[in-house]
Image (cartoon, rainbow, N blue to C red):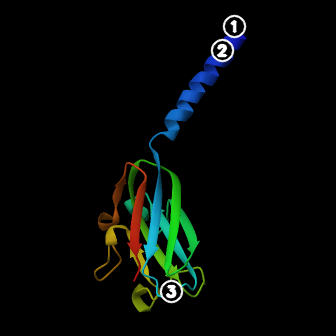
């Protein structure tokens, strides 16, 4: 009887684990537009409008080669997301800005979202993740 219960628990756990792995995808972010290979690229993945450009759901840092870079986010649940990136050319681990918060370093967002008299909007940068996806971002 105890073997039967253990077998049943393991079987159900396997089904639950398999289901939990379904509807999880990979987002490959391909960044271009850098003027040099200096520094690194910082990329943030956002899953809520409230945290857009403030606190990412996931983040990645990558080297630049031939003025391009790639960051991969794995095991991401189906949902709505937005991505931002910036080229930390001077390697100080932050986005440098001018007066009033205007970026000194190149930035970009998913869907090519740009700000008009302010930062880009989540609404313009968001996309629905329903399969493995490649997101191109051009920083400038």
Quadrant containing the C terminus in the rendered view: bottom left
Q: Nearer the viewer, residue 103 or 100?
A: 103
- Element under disc 1: loop
Choose the circle earlier in sequence order: 3 or 2.
Answer: 2
Question: How crowded is the residue under tag 1: few (<14 C-alpha within 10 Å), some, or many (20+)?
Answer: few
* Front one among 65 and 118: 65
Instruction: Work out whether 65 lies above or below 80.
Output: below
Report which quarter residue 93 is drawn in. bottom right
Question: Residue 88, how many percent across, how many down?
Answer: 54, 82
Contact between labelled residues 1 and 3, with CB atoms less than 8 Å apart: no
Q: For the point 33% across and 80% down, which residue is it?
A: 118
- Is residue 32 at all visible to an observer of this figure? yes
Residue 86 vertical placement versus 57 (above, below): below
Location of the N terminus (image quadrant):
top right
What residue is shown with label 2?
5
Going from the N terminus, do you reach mark 3 or mark 1 first? 1
Q: Residue furthest right?
A: 2
Q: Is 120 on the left-hand or right-hand side of 96?
A: left
Instruction: Kindly report the distance in space between the C-alpha atoms of the residues bearing marks 2 and 1.
Output: 6 Å
Judge whether 131 appears above or below 88 on screen: above
């Amino acid at each position: 009887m105890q073997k039967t219960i253990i077998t049943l628990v393991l079987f159900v756990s396997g089904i639950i684990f398999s289901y939990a792995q379904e509807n999880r995808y990979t987002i490959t972010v391909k960044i271009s537009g850098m003027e040099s290979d200096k520094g690194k690229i910082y990329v943030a993945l956002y899953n809520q409008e409230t945290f857009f450009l403030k606190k990412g759901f996931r983040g990645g840092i990558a080297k630049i080669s031939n003025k391009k870079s790639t960051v991969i986010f794995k095991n991401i649940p189906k949902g709505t997301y937005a991505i931002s990136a910036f080229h930390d050319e001077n390697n100080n681990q932050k986005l440098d800005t001018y007066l009033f918060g205007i970026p000194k370093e190149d930035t970009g967002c998913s869907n090519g979202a740009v700000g008009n008299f302010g930062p880009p909007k989540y609404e313009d940068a968001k996309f629905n993740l329903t399969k493995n996806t490649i997101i191109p971002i051009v920083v400038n």
